[in-house]
Image (cartoon, grey):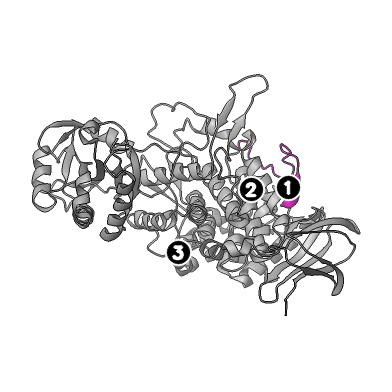
Amino acid sequence: MTGTAIGGNFELTDHFGKPVTQANYEGRFALIFFGFTHCKLVCPRALTRISEALELLERQAEHIQPLYVTVDPERDTPQVMRAFLEERWPRFIGLTGGRDEIEAMRSAFKVFATKVADPDNPDGYDMPHSSLTYLMDPHFRYRAHYPDTMEASQLTEELRRQLTQFPDGSE
Amino acid sequence: MRNLMAQPDGDWSHMDSMEAGQEGLSSYRYQLGHIVYALGLAHYHHLPAAPCVFKEAMQAAIRKMLRREVWGYWFEASQSDKRIDPDLEERREQWHDPVVKENIMYSGHLHAMAGMYGVLFDDDRYEREGGLTIRHSPLFVGEEMEFSYDFSSINDIIYWQMVENGWLGVACEPNCIFLVCNQFPMLGFRFHDVRKGTTIAEEAAAGYRQAWADRDVLDRPGTMPMMLMVRQNVLVPGGPATDSHTGAIMHAWNRDFVREHRRSQVYHALKTAEDGTISLRPLAMLPGTAESYEEAGKDAAVDELAVQWSTPDFGTVLMWLSELGDEETLAAMQAHADKHMNPTWEKGGLYYPRNDRSYDDSGNLTFVEPLTGNVLAGYARLNVPDGLWQLYNHPWGKEHFSQPHLAECPFELDVLQARYDDEERKLSLTLRPALADKVEARLVLTNSGGGPCTILRDGEVLETAEGERVELDITIDRQTGLQLVRDGAK
């Protein structure tokens, strides 16, 4: 679709504590999912599904860097994100940052995320958020997005189709 | 409606309402939008082989929609106000562009109108780059304005606002997400899928249902909220008026919910007279469930006739009943309209003239504003049960557009029937003069494939023809049957 610009430059911190920008991920496709580590359902399901899709891509998955961007930077420090991702979803790099930087990233990708009171949560709040997966090309330009309802195998096919348009990872 | 759309641009005769600022539900944009939907339903259900009856009028509605009189209100509205955002500390910087952000009460209609047009006529004029460009050139003061859009770019803008708002919808006035106004882009998404091969409608329906179910809305009986005040996170209650308008359109994409809960949403506002005709109680304008309505009604009954009506509740209930297929109640409300709302024929068209007086001396509801009188009363007569649902779910395929049809016809001609029977290989038309005693009509019938065919007039052979276009110069001075029969017909 055209008409709305999606994505843009950013300055965040990866889950190793290293400052990163979009330039760090240029040269490969980036597959981006927004969420938060206290998420009980949507994030685990999506991270698993995306990991499965990349598994199905086999060696072609080397051309794609999956990124998990938090919408809850107060709780999701680099250390928390690393611990969350490394065991179950090791393909992902977690990105966090200051509130303003995360808000700029959220806004650039038109992500819905809001803080709501949740007495069942240890910190007293939950963060409902949208669940689209964004594909950025090797120049970190928006290529496509995929809904949460897309099966892993279908996502694999979509990614394979996109990769064939950039066979060596660049235009 | 065709008569209104045939008026010169800038002539809004019959279309002005009590309210002066193009803010209320009788504003031009709502009339224009619902005219397109009503004409589209009539084309789809009643005259599928006569696009010429509807195409120009729908184009006119979309063209008028791009005029400054229709969208100019947004510059004022975009600054917001404490009435719609009590926590507003200072007014926002204003902007003119009526599509780029918020204002779904305009962009949502433009989206659905252009989409329905493309689906019904297989015509990409609004899909081409700049096909929906909004321009204004002030005569003396102010800046030249041009906002270039097309169907897909508007679709894109609305889609991403929906995503960013968690599928609760897009604001109308700043800070106000009205449920009803967000039903029209749901139509637009589906039409975009049909025209452009996208898969947005399913995602939109699932997202919208979930977003509102999370707020305990759209998952239970009773009235739906009128709107969400975003910053305050407050749901403003609705009532039968908003339920009927929202439900009439939502039925296309969320039929089970609308049908399941209809009895708890509107029927308690109906008022049956001794002669069996049905009108509405003024409490239809008040919020509440059937139960709270009964309580409020007891206290308010004596003051009923003191209410000044201002909104098109009568019309939205008509369109809701027509979609849900409650033909008995619909007929009883139409009977009330015909008895008390001054049905008037003008240039061959039926409408109910604006009447600001709420009740006559006998206490009968007489209030008519232009959306109801010009459009919604007609919408309900032209619709069929499940009418919008069918158009949404079963739009014509490519084969429809290759069938013989009446491609060109004069405005002064009434077309009473226009159907192509594929099995019989026969296009059947029924025509009559609309205004004068006779019409010298130039008709163009398409004959896809161009093979030989026979033209019959009232059963008698008029001529034989060949070629893709069959042009007929014919005098119509009474109700006339015309058939195009392709060779090889049974």
Amino acid carrying label 2: it is Gln
Amino acid carrying label 3: it is Glu
Q: Which residue lies at the image location 23% right of the left edge and 41% below the top edge?
A: A71
Task: Please state the extent of the stretch shown in magenta in the rendering.
Answer: B1-21
Question: SS at mark 3?
Answer: helix
| Measured Cα–Cα span from mark 3 to mark 1 | 41 Å
Answer whether residue B8 is magenta in the image: yes
Query: Closer to the N terminus: mark 3 or mark 1?
Result: 1
Q: Quadrant of the N terminus of chain A?
A: top left
Question: SS at mark 1?
Answer: helix
Judged left or right of residue B296, residue A68 is: left
Amino acid carrying label 1: it is Leu
Q: Position of residue B89 (x, y in %)?
A: 38, 28
What residue sits right under mark 1 in the picture?
Answer: B4
Judged left or right of residue B270, residue B434 is: right
Q: How many marks can you see?
A: 3
Front residue of B92/B342: it is B92
Q: Identify the subunit bearing mark 2.
A: B
CB atoms at circles 1 and 2 under 8 Å apart?
A: yes
**Residue B291 tag number:** 3
| Measured Cα–Cα span from mark 3 to mark 2 | 33 Å
Q: Residues within 10 Å of mark 1 (few under 14, many from 20)?
A: many
Please name the predominant secondary structure of the magenta segment in the image: loop
Above-or-below relation of B399 to A15? below
What residue sits right under mark 2 in the picture?
Answer: B31
